[in-house]
Image (tube, helix red, strand yellow):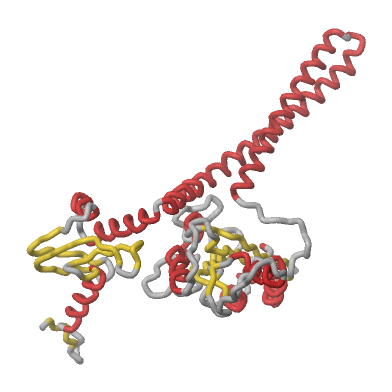
Amino acid sequence: MGYAVLHLGKASGNDAAMSAHIERTIEPKNADKSRTHLNRELLMFPDEVKNRTEAIQHRIETAGVKRKISHNQVRVIRIMLSGSPEEMKQVAEAGQLDDWCQDNVDWLRKTFGTENLVSAVLHLDEKTPHIHATVVPIVQGERRKAKVEKDNDKRKYKKKPANSARLCADDVMARDKLKAYQDSYAEAMNKYGLQRGIEGSEARHVSTQQFYRDLHLQNETLKEDIEDLTEQKQEVYGKVRDMYDMKDEAQEKFLAMDEHIQQKNKELATIENKLQKAKQEYEPYKAQEELNLIHELFPMMKENLRIAELCKKIGIGIEYIKMLFSGKTLTAKSFSFFSSEYNQKFTAKDVKLKIEKEQDNSNKLRLTLNGMNILDWFRKKYQEVQKKVVFLPKNRKTLKL
């Protein structure tokens, strides 16, 4: 009987690096590209939410959290769910993978709350099937720390409403809860031949960064060993020349030392290959982490890029995009805009195009056409076209009125 695998970790910001891994915008070296199309999102996103990053932000914005969220606050609990490779292979071969996925989603919803579970993606392009789940740690009730202070009479405590929403990863990741998660998850996975890991085991999941650091340290240690052995070899060689009477014994020792050094050199070559591979795999994530930091320091940059990309898609040139971002209003007697959503062009008269801030959220921008959000304008124009189409019942041909 194999083991159920459950890893939980905290992440601050929008966790863009992990989103890149999950959504395969950066292709991992250990993934089989020919199977990537088999990966699938197990949850449906809310309307107008397109990906994991937007789903995280949407949950926070709609949860009713009143306290200000700091830029470095933990906003995401990453959860990886899987099992021992042999048992997971048997699950897939037995045609039970869909049931396994559904039981995992049911356990996640029951454990962390349906609304807090914003994404769950099945990966089938790596060696062992597994699920990457994303939980936004929205909790209710008073803070544990505040309750302790109240019980100890350390300060006056003003009780807040019991149903007030808070973003608090510490409550979700409390030590007693982590143990309970492992117990209940193993119970849910028992019917697939997966049992709980050994309680108190020192085995730990190693991150990409830690793996890279460990390899680097091992590499440097081997180099030092080889340098020491080479010095010893030279010392033995010198004794061979000076001690003719003991030449057989010294020569034997010299050859043994030489063989040992060769073995160490082979080990060094292996470690250096692993180091290079790990470095190549880590570099894209490092670049994504740097980009994530830029977005954290300059929060409007991502929103500006989104609007710029929208402008390009509807047919606005780069020079005009620059003018829009400088605060100018673009005007034209007539202009045709392309909608990728409806895959067609719509023509507007007396055009006034402008970038404005959303009224209810100054951190959000919108592209307006004659005062209307252009996405709403596209929807309106498409509905007008649909009303003009008449379907004939016999031959199903259409007429435009």
On screen, residue 222 versus residue 275, left or right, reads: right
**Quarter location, residue 131:** bottom right
- Residue lying at the far bottom of the rendered structure: 393
- In which quadrant is the C terminus drawn? bottom left
In this view, 270 is above or below 355: above
From this view, report whether residue 272 is shown above or below residue 68. above
Figure check: 244 above or below 258: above
Q: Give the number of marks.
A: 0
Instruction: Report if residue 95 is visible in the image.
Output: no
Residue shown at 54%/71% (left/top)? 166
Residue at the extreme left of the image, as rendered: 333
Picture residue at 24% right of the left edge, 60% below the top: 355
- Residue lying at the far front in this picture: please name it: 156
Q: Residue 133: x, y in percent?
A: 55, 67
Considering depth in this image, is 249 or 149 the residue closer to the camera?
149
Question: Residue 17, image x and y in percent?
Answer: 49, 54
Residue 30 in view here:
yes
Measured from the top left, where is residue 186 in percent x and y?
Answer: 70, 72
Please report the residue visible at 72 percent of the width from the left and 27 percent of the height from the top. 226
Whether residue 300 sits left or right of residue 195 in the image: it is left
Residue for point 47% across, 74% down: 64
Q: Is residue 142 above or below residue 318?
A: below
Position of the N terminus, as image quadrant, is: bottom right
Could you say where residue 346 lies in the image, as x and y percent from the top left? 16, 69
Direction from residue 226 to residue 289 in the image, left or right: left
Residue sitting nearer the eye, 329 or 88: 329
